[in-house]
Image (cartoon, rainbow, N blue to C red):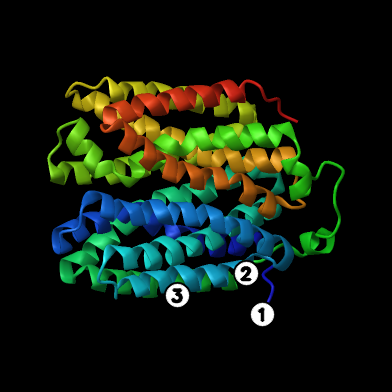
């Protein structure tokens, strides 16, 4: 297969694949439809999303290694087949348990294989703008849910849930495989890929450092609230703010805009002011927003500001932690290194569900999440940038 030498063509190819997997963040449209059409419970329809997030993170362990050793194109092809195939198989399920496998495991793994590629590849093509290009990549992933909210809703107007899964799966596989054709590492990087720089860490070396351990725990605590809010936006709107179901569904757009905008802006700010400094600010925004949600008393404006603030924090974290990993541990094994750090994200997806079940209400869940974020801020204060 041919090698692309123009960095802007690679940028388009990588982002095409990245925006396609953004359908994951529009899951609540499927979840609501499954409750209505098949009578499944809220927990039964939320778990495929949470499981997909966990498998997504876990699969980056393997996909990161493939990207480091074989390049991004192979990983994207695998990801396209898994994600599209998982969605297609989801069109045939007749029970929630089957959906856990097809969507949660197979499609979730596909997201993980695709997700790592633009992050690790575009940093190599745009080495002087790591924060900005990482922010753009993850912003496309977060903001793409706006598009897929409309796409999936449009499918559901003309067909049932099974038909919507089938159509989305076919389109997704085609788009990701098309993106894979135009995505590869720069030739200069391929020549240097076997050379380990003085500031580069292998994955095993990274894992022995205290900075890795602190970063991992910090990441885990940081993304718990955002994952919970994005996956249950409609339910939160109805329970916490007393919104009508139709109005609450519109929260997906609010969250997507806040999420995507924050990813782009925070990445750009990290290039100018330092990654760790921006991380601390994002923690403060997250804590304040969670407290606002927990103390909410039917104040619609405060609700929108607070839930938007959680999405801003989540988007910022997803933009800044990849940059911080590259900055502190180098590019030599960046795919593998970030794959290990990203496991914190997978654990956070399951932690949010556990906290909600123990807490019982969303208000109590937000208070617990605020405490977790405060601990994360404290850990950030222990680190120093290289």
Number of the label disc, if any, that sits on residue 73: 2
How many numbered marks does the figure carry?
A: 3
Q: Residues within 10 Å of mark 3 (few under 14, many from 20)?
A: some
Taking 168 as reference, is 269 above or below it? above
Q: Position of residue 57 (x, y in %)?
A: 53, 52
Taking 183 as reference, is 275 above or below it? above
Q: Residue furthest front?
A: 358
The Cα atoms of the two marked residues, 1 and 3, are separated by: 17 Å
Q: Earlier in the sequence, mark 2 or mark 1?
A: 1
Q: Is residue 341 left or right of residue 301?
A: right
Give me the residue at 44% from left, 23% from top: 371
Give me the residue at 75% from left, 42% from top: 206
Considering depth in this image, is 334 or 129 the residue closer to the camera?
334
Q: Position of residue 184 (x, y in %)?
A: 66, 66
Q: Is residue 210 left or right of residue 178?
A: right
Nearest to the eye among marks 2 and 1: give it.
Answer: 2
Give me the residue at 20% from left, 53% from top: 41
The Cα atoms of the two marked residues, 2 and 3, are separated by: 14 Å
Q: Which residue is mark 3?
A: 174
Mark yes or no: residue 360 visible: yes
* Residue 292 occupies quadrant: top left
* Residue 205 occupies quadrant: top right
Q: Is residue 248 left or right of residue 134?
A: left
Taking 313 as reference, is 98 above or below it? below
Number of the label disc, if any, that sits on residue 260: none
Considering depth in this image, is 274 or 285 the residue closer to the camera?
285
Q: Earlier in the sequence, mark 2 or mark 3?
A: 2
Q: Residue furthest left?
A: 244
Q: Residues within 10 Å of mark 2 (few under 14, many from 20)?
A: many
């Amino acid at each position: 297969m041919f090698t692309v030498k123009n960095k802007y063509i690679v940028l388009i190819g990588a982002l095409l694949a990245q925006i396609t997997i953004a359908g994951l963040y529009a899951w609540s449209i499927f979840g609501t439809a499954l409750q209505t059409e098949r009578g499944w419970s809220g927990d039964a329809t939320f778990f495929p999303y949470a499981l997909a997030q966990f498998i997504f993170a876990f699969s980056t362990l393997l996909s990161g290694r493939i990207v480091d050793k074989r390049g991004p194109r192979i990983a994207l092809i695998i990801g396209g087949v898994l994600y599209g195939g998982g969605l297609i198989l989801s069109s045939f399920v007749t029970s929630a348990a089957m959906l856990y496998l097809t969507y949660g495991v197979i499609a979730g793994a596909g997201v993980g294989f695709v997700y790592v590629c633009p992050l690790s590849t575009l940093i190599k093509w745009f080495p002087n703008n790591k924060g900005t290009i990482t922010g753009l990549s993850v912003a496309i992933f977060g903001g793409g849910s706006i598009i897929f909210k409309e796409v999936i809703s449009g499918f559901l107007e003309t067909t049932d849930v099974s038909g919507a899964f089938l159509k989305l799966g076919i389109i997704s596989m085609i788009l990701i495989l098309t993106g894979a054709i135009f995505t590869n590492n720069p030739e200069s990087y391929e020549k240097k890929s076997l050379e380990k720089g003085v500031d580069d860490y292998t994955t095993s070396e990274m894992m022995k450092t205290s900075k890795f351990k602190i970063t991992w725990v910090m990441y885990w605590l940081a993304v718990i609230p955002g994952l919970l809010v994005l996956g249950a936006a409609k339910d939160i709107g109805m329970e916490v703010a007393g919104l009508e179901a139709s109005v609450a569904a519109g929260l997906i757009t609010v969250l997507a805009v806040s999420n995507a905008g924050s990813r782009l802006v925070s990445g750009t700010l990290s290039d100018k002011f330092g990654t760790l400094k921006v991380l601390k600010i994002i923690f403060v925004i997250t804590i304040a927003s969670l407290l606002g949600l927990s103390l909410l008393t039917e104040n619609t404006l405060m609700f929108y500001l607070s839930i938007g603030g959680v999405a801003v924090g989540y988007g910022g974290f997803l933009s800044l932690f990849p940059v911080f990993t590259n900055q502190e541990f180098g590019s030599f094994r960046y795919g593998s290194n970030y794959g290990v750090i990203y496991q914190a994200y997978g654990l956070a997806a399951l932690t949010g569900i556990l906290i909600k079940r123990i807490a019982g209400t969303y208000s109590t869940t937000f208070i617990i999440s605020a405490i977790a974020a405060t601990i994360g801020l404290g850990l950030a204060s222990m680190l120093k940038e290289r």
